[in-house]
């Protein structure tokens, strides 16, 4: 099996990446790095770009044993830096309550074990409708014990959120006076993808002044937010379509000579969403002209029934990682960081959707995860570039939480 080789390996040697890493670490704000992040990458062979950055990751169960060991160490370092010194910290872990998805339950079991190995006494808090007493959820010879959220809040030294707050802040934590990680204001009720990528662009501009070998285009997809939308109104959908048409023409003009064989396309995404909900793509104006009803259907509601009022137009980056197994299968790297440090990665796979190979949105129902035996030959070399892009977006997420200087 063969893949297009990445041209980035010739452009960024180990010495250049060391200088870029040093420049990034100089920008970490006083509040420090995020507790954890997962970063979806697209590796086209000509560019390596983060297309989603999640501050409430839900796939720790997909990591290798060595990645788990690194995660324990980094969780311990984070807790030691943030909390008063104790032999054991009492931590409340607050997960999503809307799903009994088996993959998510295995993720919670893994995350719980990680935090306990890092020095926590941990209780899992139920974030849905209040429960009067603890209850046990059993699945496949495993179990998770949930406690009432208000009781966990009273008991704990700190709260770990694994709940993205799409529906808003949790009432039971409204008056909580101790530390909550990540900051609840980074929940999707308030956070914007477009604002994160705006910060990441500023970060790249900053470090490119110190490391002139850096070409920002190699690591950043163009994007633009469109706000004040009501998808029930035809005129608002038409306004979005006009913006999307102009955006497609803009990225066509910016394609570099090394990308001449890559078809320009655009993703339209909910600017405050997760789970792959609210995503549509197009590559021609004809597709866009016929899209009114599709856009209204896709963006009528986000997660937990929230109304979608704002979207991000994001330049599509194809993946060079395509294999044929009867049907075509595409995959993309997903990188996990704890305390700002990359602890591991795996691949998200999905069968190709209709359209050009390599352009599918892979964060959708039916996708699956593997550590992978199907690496391209240059994968080991690419890991250092994955680490750089992961650090870029961990620093950018830290600056979302604690904006300072030119990043306000």
Image (cartoon, rainbow, N blue to C red):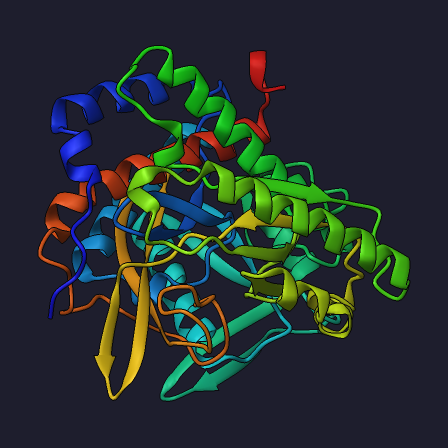
- Seen from the viewer's position, the closer of residues 88 and 394 is 394
- Residue 318 seen from this side: yes
- In x, y percent, where is residue 305? 77, 69
Horizontal placement of 221 versus 135: left or right? left
Residue 284 image-quadrant placement = bottom right
What residue is rendered at 53% in x and 27% in y? 399
- In x, y percent, where is residue 381? 12, 44
Residue 167 image-quadrant placement = bottom right
What residue is rendered at 62% in x and 57% in y? 268
What residue is rendered at 45% in x and 41% in y? 35
- Vertical position of residue 77 compared to residue 380: above or below: above
**How many numbered marks, from 0 up?**
0
What residue is rendered at 60% in x and 64% in y? 279
Residue 95 image-quadrant placement = bottom right
- Vertical position of residue 23 compared to residue 128: above or below: above
Horizontal placement of 276 versus 347: left or right? right
Q: Which quadrant holds the C terminus?
A: top right
- Residue 271 seen from this side: no
- Seen from the viewer's position, the closer of residues 402 and 283 is 283
- Vertical position of residue 75 compared to residue 233: above or below: above
């Amino acid at each position: 099996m063969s893949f297009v080789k990445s041209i980035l390996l010739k452009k960024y040697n180990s010495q250049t990446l060391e200088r870029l890493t040093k420049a990034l670490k100089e920008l970490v704000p006083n509040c420090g790095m995020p507790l954890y992040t997962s970063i979806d990458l697209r590796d086209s062979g000509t560019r390596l770009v983060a297309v989603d950055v999640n501050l409430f990751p839900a796939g720790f169960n997909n990591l290798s044993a060595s990645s788990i060991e690194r995660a324990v160490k980094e969780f311990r370092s984070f807790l030691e830096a943030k909390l008063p010194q104790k032999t054991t910290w009492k931590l409340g872990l607050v997960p999503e309550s809307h799903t009994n998805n088996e993959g998510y339950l295995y993720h919670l079991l893994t995350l719980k074990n990680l935090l306990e190995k890092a020095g926590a006494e941990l209780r899992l808090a139920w974030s849905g409708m209040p429960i009067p007493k603890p209850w046990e959820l059993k699945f496949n010879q495993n179990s998770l014990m949930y406690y009432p959220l208000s009781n966990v809040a009273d008991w704990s030294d700190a709260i770990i959120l694994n709940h993205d707050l799409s529906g808003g802040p949790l009432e039971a934590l409204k008056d909580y006076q101790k530390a909550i990680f990540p900051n609840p204001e980074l929940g999707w009720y308030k956070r914007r993808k477009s604002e994160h990528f705006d910060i990441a662009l500023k970060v790249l501009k900053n470090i490119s002044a110190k490391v002139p070998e850096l070409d920002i285009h190699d690591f950043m997809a163009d994007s633009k937010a469109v706000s004040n939308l009501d998808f029930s109104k035809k005129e608002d959908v038409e306004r979005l379509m006009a913006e999307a048409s102009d955006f497609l023409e803009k990225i066509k003009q910016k394609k570099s000579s090394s990308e001449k064989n890559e078809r320009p396309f655009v993703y339209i995404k909910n600017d405050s969403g997760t789970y792959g909900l609210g995503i549509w793509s197009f590559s021609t104006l004809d597709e866009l002209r016929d899209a009114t009803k599709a856009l209204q259907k896709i963006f009528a509601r986000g997660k937990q029934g929230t109304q979608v009022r704002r979207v991000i137009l994001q330049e599509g980056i194809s993946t060079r990682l395509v294999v044929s197994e009867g049907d075509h299968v595409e995959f993309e790297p997903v990188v996990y960081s704890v305390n700002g440090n990359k602890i591991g990665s795996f691949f998200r796979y999905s069968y190709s959707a209709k359209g050009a190979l390599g352009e599918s949105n892979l964060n959708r129902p039916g996708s699956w995860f593997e550590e992978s035996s199907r690496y391209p030959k240059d994968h080991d070399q690419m890991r250092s570039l994955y680490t750089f892009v992961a650090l870029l977006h961990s620093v950018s997420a830290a600056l979302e939480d604690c904006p300072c200087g030119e990043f306000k």
